[in-house]
């Protein structure tokens, strides 16, 4: 303990990029099973706004990344609309592979992750916070997928990023096929343990309660991969919309004009959420390689050809 091996890291998400870091987004959260942590969600539920970056790491480093995010906001002079910040920091448990009680994630690592966040392709698998994670008893970690949705002649993008660290091997299902039951052996956990954090982002114009409705559809995609949300799993989700930037930029007390889709138009976004979540879970395993970690523990990669 304290010496490693280190199989962990930090993932940082800036919803509007660095230039728009001070501009909130309409947001909502949902927890399928609460054996986990995502800080800042009480204020999101109250205000309907996501006002900070998001960090995702291991269970025992969640507080470090939360506090470091406040430091980052203060150092860069980024306001949250009030005199204090309530950052979103989430976690899943990587102690099967990582020396989690060595507390290796530092403020400096978090600041580097926030400073290094950039647009473009997302690094999948064993990167950042997903480094030491296990999914369906194969090497897991970061997964992402997206969909284009057309509603009333306008096209929107919906993307999902998740840190996959859950599932029992026998339950793994791919496109309806129960492949996990046919892929025995090389198990590290041998039981359903761990959690999943999912972030849903869209440029479709949504109000806060509609973003929450997207977050509630994340379990639909998870269920397609076989999980049932076991007792030990922290399954916590956040959805936000980057639309209405001008309205959220205005900090005054005057009424704001905001655009939103009618509830009757949301079904394509619900479907996109379920599909992207399902694909992101599978992608987190597809891109991975076998990892050896703490005490020689070995998490086998998904045998893709098989």
Image (cartoon, rainbow, N blue to C red):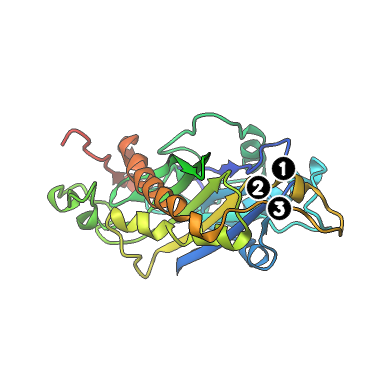
Q: Nearer the viewer, residue 257 or 182?
A: 257
Please tell me how crowded label 1 is: few (under 14), some (14-19), or many (20+) other residues with Cα within 10 Å: some
Give the mark nearest the N terminus, 1 or 3: 1
Picture residue at 69% right of the left edge, 53% below the top: 67
Instruction: Report x, y in % for residue 179.
Output: 17, 48
Between marks 1 and 2, how big is the CA–CA gap? 7 Å
Provide the secondary structure element on which disc 2 rests. Answer: loop
Between marks 1 and 3, how big is the CA–CA gap? 19 Å
- From the image, tell me which residue sits under label 2: 53
Checking the image for residue 258, the label placed there is: 3
Answer with the quarter of the image where residue 130 lies. top left
Instruction: Report x, y in % for residue 64.
Output: 63, 53
Checking the image for residue 69, the label placed there is: none
Q: Is residue 210 visible?
A: yes
Q: Is residue 166 visible?
A: no
Q: Is residue 105 above or below residue 113?
A: below
Outermost residue, left side: 182
User: Exactly how many numbered labels are in the figure?
Assistant: 3
Q: Nearer the viewer, residue 173 or 266?
A: 266
- From the image, tell me which residue sits under label 1: 21
Picture residue at 61% right of the left edge, 63% below the top: 41
Picture residue at 41% right of the left edge, 44% below the top: 141
Q: Is residue 147 above or below residue 241?
A: above
Outermost residue, top side: 120
Discs 3, 2 touching: Cβ within 8 Å: no
Please tell me how crowded label 2 is: few (under 14), some (14-19), or many (20+) other residues with Cα within 10 Å: many
* Quadrant where the image shows the C terminus: top left
């Amino acid at each position: 303990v304290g010496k490693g091996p280190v199989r962990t890291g930090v993932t940082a998400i800036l919803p509007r990029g660095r230039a728009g870091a001070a501009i909130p987004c309409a947001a909502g959260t949902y927890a399928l099973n609460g054996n986990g942590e995502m800080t800042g969600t009480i204020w999101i539920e109250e205000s309907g706004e996501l006002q900070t970056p998001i960090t995702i790491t291991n269970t025992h480093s969640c507080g470090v990344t939360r506090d470091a995010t406040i430091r980052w906001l203060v150092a860069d002079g980024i306001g949250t609309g009030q005199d204090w910040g309530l950052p979103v920091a989430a976690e899943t448990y990587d102690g099967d592979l990582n020396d989690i009680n060595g507390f290796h994630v530092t403020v400096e690592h978090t600041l580097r992750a926030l400073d290094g966040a950039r647009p473009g392709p997302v690094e999948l698998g064993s990167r950042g916070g997903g480094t030491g994670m296990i999914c369906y008893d194969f090497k897991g970690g970061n997964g992402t997928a997206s969909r284009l949705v057309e509603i009333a002649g306008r096209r929107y993008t919906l993307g999902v990023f998740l840190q996959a660290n859950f599932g029992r091997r026998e339950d793994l299902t791919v496109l309806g096929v129960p492949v996990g039951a046919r892929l025995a052996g090389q198990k590290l956990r041998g039981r359903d343990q761990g959690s999943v954090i999912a972030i849903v982002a869209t440029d479709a114009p949504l109000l806060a309660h509609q973003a929450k409705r997207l977050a509630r559809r994340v379990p639909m995609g998870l269920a397609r991969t076989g999980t049932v949300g076991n007792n030990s799993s922290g399954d916590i989700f956040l959805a936000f919309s980057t639309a209405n930037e001008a309205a959220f930029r205005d900090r005054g007390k005057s009424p704001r004009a905001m655009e939103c889709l009618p509830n009757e138009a949301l079904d394509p976004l619900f479907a996109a959420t379920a599909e992207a979540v399902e694909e992101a879970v599978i992608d987190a395993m597809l891109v991975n390689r076998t990892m050896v970690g703490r005490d020689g523990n070995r998490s086998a990669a998904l045998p893709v050809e098989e």
